[in-house]
Each structure stands twice: as C-alpha cells, then as structure tokens.
Amino acid sequence: MLILYNSIFKKQQLHNICKLYNIKNYSGANKDKLIKKINSNKACIYIQRTYRSKFNDEFICPITLCKLEYPYVCIKNYNNFRYYSLNEFIEYLNRSNNDLRDPITREILSDSSLKQIENLVIYYKIKKTFNKNAWKKKKDLRLEFLTITTCLNEILNQIFHIEELTFNYIYSHILPQFIYYFHFLLQRHKNNCFTVVNNYINCINHHPCDNKIYLIDYLKSIISINNL
C-alpha cells in the first residue's frame, strides 16, 4: 500500500525522511517541496516494486507482463531462471540495436543461450519473426568487439612488461597500435568506447613510470575529441 506524507510532519522530520530514502538536493526546499519530493520518490518505489513483483512471477512474461505463452524460453541469470514467451522474446531481439541482451538484467546473452533460442525457433518452426541475418550481424559485431579489445589487452600487457617506458618506445610501438585499434573501435563500437578507454586509463595509472602520462593524455583526448 502507498502511504503519502502531508503537512502534519515537521520540516526537520521531513529532512530526516529524505536522508532515510537517500533523496538528494533537499536542503534548500521549503516544506511543500519536501513533501512533494518525498511523495514522488515513494510513488516511484511503489511502481518499481509492483512491476518487479510481476517480473518475478514465473507465469508472467516480463516483456509483455501478460500470461506466459507456450512455447517459451528459459534464461538463467544470477542462479535464477527467468521465462519469456518465445515469440515475444524473438521480436524483442529482432528490435535490439546492436547487443543481444536480457531485457531485465541487461546482461549480454551468451552464445549458448542464443544457440538454444535458435534451436527452439527451428523446432517450433517459427520463421516469420526469426530474423536470422540480423542476429548473425549482431553476433559478428560482438565477436569483432571482443577481438579488438583482446588486441588492446595485449598492448596493455606489453606496457606492464616494461618498467621504463621511454619516450621513443611509447611513440614508436605503443601509440601506433593504440591509434590503429581505437580507430576501428570508434568506427564500429562507439557506444562501448567510453567504458573501454576509461578502463585503460585506470589500468595505465598503476604503471610506476612517469612517462605513462603521455599514454593517459592520448586516451583522454579520445574521450574529449569524440564526445564520449
């Protein structure tokens, strides 16, 4: 049940409630704004809990929030099993932009899960909604992304195998490789670039050599120039 707050509460009590619910930017608000802010927060929590309770119902499809329809697909997340109506799940994957992700947890679906879905599609002869070419393209993009990041990780290993990063070594060996692989990453996987670049900045920061700053500056320039 949703219980709302009113003007009976004192301002200090409302401040304490804001702290309790981790509500931000309340210090300068008057009493009416505090009540509105708290009630809005409570309403959001109530709506989220209501919908999440439906997601946890194994007889409800989390995509449609309607009764689970046969045939269905089962996806395992964090040692929990979640069920989706197969037709709706395929439609969802067909509409996905690049990554094939679980609609609830946002985890990238494993190759084994995708293979399971493809087998179910073939078994139940679901051809009208199954966009095999689009799925293949998305899986190829994922493989390409993993290949590029693997190559970048190899460069990172090279950096940490050398204690003294000389100016010549950075500009002759490391930066040309960075420029080459980040070019392809920006072209094909720009949405994931910020996370990747930021991770490399954090890693290189742990190198003992002061010349690491040249590499860090280059990586930071990628973020600023490309508006990541």
Image (tube, rainbow, N blue to C red):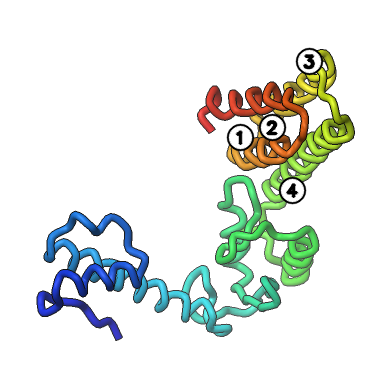
Name the residue nearer the viewer: 90 or 152.
Answer: 152
User: Residue tagged by mark 4?
Assistant: 139
- Under circle 1, the secondary element is helix
Q: Are marks 2 and 3 in contact (CB under 8 Å)?
A: no
In percent of the image, x 15 and y 69: which residue is there? 11
Of badges 3 and 4, the one in the foreground is 3
Q: Is residue 201 left or right of residue 207?
A: left
Q: Is residue 32 left or right of residue 64?
A: left
Q: Position of residue 100 (x, y in %)?
A: 65, 54
**Within 10 Å of the Cα at label 4, are there few (<14), some (14-19), or many (20+) other Cα atoms?**
some
User: Residue tagged by mark 1?
Assistant: 190
Of badges 2 and 3, the one in the foreground is 3
Q: Is residue 176 visible?
A: yes
Q: Which callout, 1 or 4, points at the residue further toward the start of the chain? A: 4
Q: Position of residue 226 (x, y in %)?
A: 55, 26
User: Above or below — where is 131 with respect to 84?
Assistant: above
Q: Is residue 65 left or right of residue 206?
A: left
Alpha-carbon span between mark 2 and mark 1: 6 Å
Q: Which callout, 3 or 4, points at the residue further toward the start of the chain? A: 4
Q: Which mark is residue 167?
A: 3
Q: Is residue 128 visible?
A: no
